[in-house]
Image: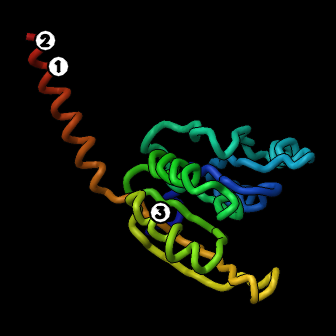
């Protein structure tokens, strides 16, 4: 886990008015946040609060370079309402942007109990994150009989990718010095 003050930039994939992003901004963390503009001016309100709003849909790639972010946060957006293929695409895109050792905080992912065991847990595990924290609980706001559950997880991008990047960099330097001769 990171020491206090180690996180510098974080995208926030959420709905609402960026309350989490504003709290992080108070700790000198640069936040870029999304919102579902459901016939409301949420992004305008987010910008008025001093946070950078992102105008992207769930089917677009995140507008960040590979291996550059400290943490990606998603709350109430990634859930079972997204088609499984699109969710898998999103998870790989989310995996792309944190630096090795960076975190993905998946907060309040909800689905049916059966879906969690058969679809979503294997899907999330297939992406390559290490589980730092994995908490599952019942979702009771629409009734116990619906069999819904929440997942909140803190997932870490492994450091093993760094070794691959160093190898490529070393190979590029060798190739470059050979080409200079």
Q: Residue at x 62, y 49 (%)?
A: 11
Q: Residue at x 73, y 38 (%)?
A: 55
Considering depth in this image, is 68 or 112 the residue closer to the camera?
Answer: 112
Considering depth in this image, is 113 or 133 the residue closer to the camera?
Answer: 113
Residue receiving disc 3: 123
Q: Secondary structure at mark 2?
A: helix
Q: Residue at x 64, y 68 (%)?
A: 109
Q: How far, Cα to Cα, is label 3 from label 1?
A: 40 Å
Disc 2 residue crowd, few under 14, some 14–19, many 20+, Cα 10 Å: few
Q: Residue at x 45, y 46 (%)?
A: 96
Disc 3 residue crowd, few under 14, some 14–19, many 20+, Cα 10 Å: some
x and y percent of residue 45 in the render? 87, 47
Query: Residues at badges 1 and 2 in contact (C-beta under 8 Å)?
Result: yes
35 in relation to 145, above or below: above
Q: How far, Cα to Cα, is label 1 from label 2?
A: 6 Å
x and y percent of residue 34 in the render? 72, 47
Quarter of the figure that contains the N terminus: bottom left
Whether residue 24 sits left or right of residue 69 in the image: it is: right
- Residue 51 is tagged as none
x and y percent of residue 170 in the render? 17, 34
- Residue 180 is tagged as 2
Q: Secondary structure at mark 3?
A: helix
Whether residue 149 sits left or right of residue 5 in the image: it is: right
Query: Residues at badges 2 and 3 in contact (C-beta under 8 Å)?
Result: no
Residue receiving disc 1: 176
Considering depth in this image, is 30 or 64 the residue closer to the camera?
Answer: 64
Q: Secondary structure at mark 1?
A: helix
Q: How far, Cα to Cα, is label 2 from label 3?
A: 46 Å
Earlier sequence position, callout 3 versus callout 1: 3
């Amino acid at each position: 886990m990171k020491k206090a003050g180690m996180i510098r930039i974080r995208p926030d994939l959420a709905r609402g008015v960026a309350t989490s992003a504003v709290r992080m901004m108070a700790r000198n963390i640069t936040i870029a946040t999304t919102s579902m503009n459901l016939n409301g001016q949420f992004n305008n309100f987010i910008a008025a609060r001093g946070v950078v709003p992102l105008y992207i849909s769930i089917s677009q790639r995140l507008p960040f370079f590979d291996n550059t972010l400290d943490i990606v946060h998603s709350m109430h957006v990634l859930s079972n309402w997204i088609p499984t293929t699109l969710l898998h695409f999103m998870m790989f895109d989310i995996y792309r942007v944190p630096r090795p050792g960076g975190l993905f905080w998946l907060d309040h992912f909800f689905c049916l109990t059966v879906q969690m065991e058969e679809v979503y847990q294997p899907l999330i595990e297939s992406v390559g994150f290490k589980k730092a924290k994995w908490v599952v609980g019942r979702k009771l706001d629409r009734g116990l009989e619906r069999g819904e559950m929440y997942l909140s997880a803190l997932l870490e991008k492994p450091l093993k990718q760094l070794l691959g990047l160093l190898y490529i960099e070393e190979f590029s330097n060798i190739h470059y010095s050979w080409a200079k001769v």
